Structure formats: structure tokens, C-alpha cells
Image (cartoon, rainbow, N blue to C red):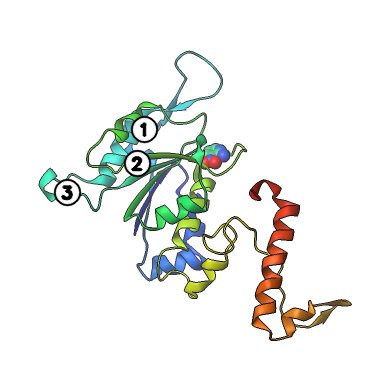
Amino acid sequence: MRIDIVTIFPEYLAPLRLSLVGRAVDARTIDLRVHDLRAFTHDRHHTVDDTPYGGGPGMVMSPAAWGEALDHICGRRGVEADDGAHRPTLVVPTPSGRRFTQATAQEFSREPWLVFACGRYEGIDARVTQHYAGRPDWNGVRELSIGDYVLAGGEVATLVMVEAAARLVPGVLGNETSVLDDSFAAGEMENLLEGPVFTKPPVWRDLAVPEVLLSGHHGRIAQWRRDQARVRTADHRPDLLH
Ligand code: JBE
């Protein structure tokens, strides 16, 4: 899977070189390329923003540098060379997007090529998404939000989306079965949160591990985990119980 990220703060994406995703990058399972938007400007101050038409607070990111950056990433391949299987999907993290969920992460993990456009200030000139949504050499545009709060830019939301998708790419996680137990994972525990987990020692500061987990009865343990998942969901996320 190829992932391109365009930002005015390339250092912000450095955590993707660490841990699980970093190992997938080292192993070339993920081809990660981070680009500085300012490299696609032509004025001496590398300007990427301007005042909003119609007035209002803050600044808006200008379309010109975005167009040059995204065209550079996509490359200049003829229509004959385009087999349709390797077109990039443009992802724009924004608080005004549709919600990014585990289902979106699953879809992303099956995409061959994702390009993230990290906006700062009040966002990116709307003609950028409009233009790439209509480009036959691109696989569409996804404007997505990771939650109902406002961040300073799309970089942290990009970290979230890349990590959520990358760990679902075959070969990235060591233990392939562990994603089946995730909170929000499809399957038996669909729409339930994961319950509490324990490890050694069996007693810590007078607190004992629930006896059933030490019993070796796999059926009773599975039943207990289902019960705990329902208790946890009712307490923390009653909205998930239908
Ligand atoms: O969720 N997001 O994708 C965001 C992007 C930029 C700023 N705030 C957000 N919540």
C-alpha cells in the first residue's frame, strides 16, 4: 500500500516511522512518502494561504500549491497506462467531513494508494476537492472527521487514520487474529466495546484477577468476556446498544 501525506509540517508525521506502522514502512509493506506543501510554491516567502473571499476570520489555504503537489504525486501517466487499479484516493481530514470509523479503516486497508491532504488555518480552498473529485485519474475524494472537536490542522487526524488503517493491512500486525477482538470489530462482538483484561500476578495490591479467567474453562471464559463487553458498553457507550 502506498501512502502520500502533504503538509506544511512534515516533522508532525515523524511518529509514523515508529512502532507498528514504522516497522511496516521498514518492511516496505507500506510505501510512506511525506511531502512539504511549501516545496510547491514559487514566491520567495513560500506562501500557502490568503484571506477568505466574503470576509471572516483566519486564512484559507490557496489552491495553486495544492494542485501542483497533488499532480506531482499522481504523476503524469497516459490514460493507456492507467489500468484503474492504482489510482490514488484523496483523503482530506476536516471537522466538517463524514465520520471516520473502524469501517472506514477497513475500506482504507484495502486501498492500493491513499493521499492525505493536511489543511491548516480555516481549511483548503473548496475548489481543490471539487477538482480532484472530477479527475478520472483519481479514485475520488473523502472528506472525513475523526470526531467532534477542532484540531489545529489535519496532521493529527491523518496520524489517526493511517494507524487505524495500517494495522489492518495483512502482514502489519504480528497476530492476525487479534484484530477480530478489537472494539468495533465486525463479528460476534460487533458494536461492543472490549471488556477489561488482566495479566500476572494473580493478586496485585489486594486486587485479584477474576477467578473465571484462571479456571481454564474456555466456554465460561468466552461467556464472561461477552458479559463484560455488554456491561462496559452499557456504562461507557449506551448509544452503541440497539
Ligand atoms: O477530525 N478531523 O479530521 C479534523 C481535521 C482538522 C481539524 N479538526 C479536526 N477534528
Q: Amino acid at mark 2?
A: Ala
Rendering quadrant holding ligand 1:
top right
Q: Amino acid at mark 3?
A: Asp
Label 2 sits on residue = 39
Q: Is residue 139 above or below residue 212?
A: above
218 horizontally vs 98: left or right: right
Circle 2 SS class: helix
Quadrant location of the N terminus in the rendered image: bottom left
Disc 2 residue crowd, few under 14, some 14–19, many 20+, Cα 10 Å: few
Circle 1 SS class: helix
Whole-percent x and y of residue 56? 54, 17
Instruction: Pick the residue in front: 21 or 9.
Output: 21
Label 1 sits on residue = 129
Circle 3 SS class: loop
Discs 2/1, front? 1
- Residue at the outermost left position: 80
Whether residue 164 is visible, yes or no, is yes
Disc nearer the start of the sequence (2/1): 2
Label 3 sits on residue = 82
Q: Is residue 84 above or below residue 229?
A: above
Q: Is residue 131 above or below residue 37?
A: above
